[in-house]
Image (cartoon, coloured by chain):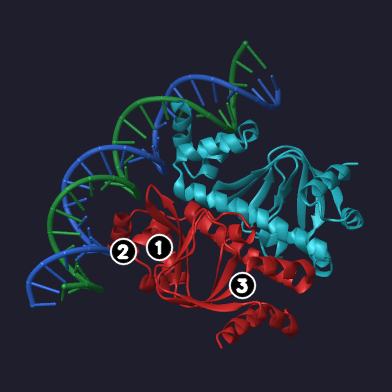
Chain colours: A cyan, B red, C green, D blue
Amino acid sequence: MEKTKFKAWIKSHFPRVEDSMLDVFINHAQWVQYPKGTQLIAEGNRHPYSYFLIKGSVKSFYLKDGKSVCLWFAFENELVGTLKAMEGAPSRETVELLEDSEFIRLNNETLLRLAEKDLAFSHLVSQLILEHADFLEERLYQLQFMTSKERYEALLKLAPEVLQKVSLTDIASYLGVSRETLSRIRSQK
Amino acid sequence: MEKTKFKAWIKSHFPRVEDSMLDVFINHAQWVQYPKGTQLIAEGNRHPYSYFLIKGSVKSFYLKDGKSVCLWFAFENELVGTLKAMEGAPSRETVELLEDSEFIRLNNETLLRLAEKDLAFSHLVSQLILEHADFLEERLYQLQFMTSKERYEALLKLAPEVLQKVSLTDIASYLGVSRETLSRIRSQK
DNA sequence: ATAGCTTTGTGACATTTGTCAAATGAATTC
DNA sequence: GAATTCATTTGACAAATGTCACAAAGCTAT
């Protein structure tokens, strides 16, 4: 069962969550699968789920003047979701599958209800938000302090799988430069 | 007593925190006061406190090639602290007073210990991190999507007091442009 | 294999922004 | 209030990046 993978991941990331709790949690989760191109979360809509990505890859983006500008990518063994969805608010971003992918799906309300009553889950939720905030701070640092070339190199170092799975157009938008500029950065080295 | 102001603020922001809990919390807090220019939190150091700003203003910045680049500003009735300090890790940023200021000071470990044991406090901590994450997402959106002129106008709209209290040099670095460019943006309108 | 589509790369040029230097303006000290 | 310091503005130029046009390379389906 794919849930095993998810369970192992939680246990390694949140060793303080007890097994009994974890089982309650897992029982509320479902395995789901969607084809490439599916919009998991659509801009402007409320979305009731968060996901753990078992297999595949996704991108998150806003639309700007009809073009997509990527905010993040996710690959195997990563969490996929948005703060807005967690808060029950309409999403500002769209999350779309880059290839056929499998997920463990978690209902946000269920998650919050568990966190409401149980201290360990509340800490888990804090932890998740904290990790996301750390990611955002790093992104912000890079956008404010690093040149586009440095950002490209940092991305390659941190997540080399991006190059395999994501188009250069999407990577360029993620880095905050035009396709052409990224192309030139790449040809320089 | 200045703690009253802090108490009122918490009650309006987190109506679900009970009075008894709040009193425990407040009893762990201290009122402190520092002169303009004080570095509340210094880059590279661990820092044991978070603050509620009673009166005054602060800026947060990194150093880049000897120049400061601002990450955020805070004014009356706002929380002042860093995620890194919360996590007990060395700070990457420096937090400095823009004028003589007064704070309610909270020990991070005490805060976390309370959150450890008490559900209401755990939710409060989640909520605080969540608000910070929302701020970061908005910042990121602005840096990636908006022109420097639009960012300047957004800042004026959201926090007009910035113009009163913060130098244009610091505002420029916050917006991600040079002093000269900000000056030209301002003269355009 | 070919035709058609999508992605990526390259050149020419315009625009934005940064950098350096100097001038102006505002605030502070003696 | 004159002198000094600091912050802001302005001008001239250079560097980085965006935009547009098109060429080249990779894929897909027939």
Q: Chain letter for mark 3, please.
A: B
Type of residue at label 1? Tyr
SS assignment at label 2: helix
| Residue in view at x 44 percent, y 41 percent | A147
Q: Going 79% across and 69% down the picture, which residue do you hit?
A: B117
Q: Residue at x 87, y 54 (%)?
A: A22
- Do we see residue A45 in this rendering? no
Q: Residue under circle 3?
A: B106
Earlier residue among tags 2 and 1: 1
Q: Which residue is mark 1?
A: B152
User: Disc 2 designates what residue?
Assistant: B186
**Horizontal arrangement in the rendering, residue B158 relative to residue A26 (left or right):** left
Q: Residue at x 49, y 48 (%)?
A: A143
Q: Quadrant of the N terminus of chain B?
A: bottom right
Residue A82 image point, x, y percent: 68, 56
Is label 1 or label 3 in front?
3
Q: Nearer the viewer, residue D2 or B76?
A: D2
**Amino acid type of disc 3?**
Leu
Q: Secondary structure at mark 1?
A: helix
Marks 1/3: CA–CA distance: 33 Å
Q: Is residue B171 above or below residue B100?
A: above
Give residue B109's position: percent from left, percent from top: 67, 65
Query: Are the residues tagged 2 and 1 within 8 Å (C-beta)?
Result: yes
Cα distance in 3D space between marks 2 and 1: 9 Å
Front residue of this view, candidates B186 and A140:
A140
Same chain for mark 2 and mark 1? The answer is: yes
| Labels 2 and 3 touching (C-beta < 8 A) | no
Other residues around mark 2 within 10 Å, as few (<14) / some (14–19) / many (≥20): few
First along the sequence among labels 1 and 3:
3
The number of numbered discs placed on residues in the rendered structure image is: 3
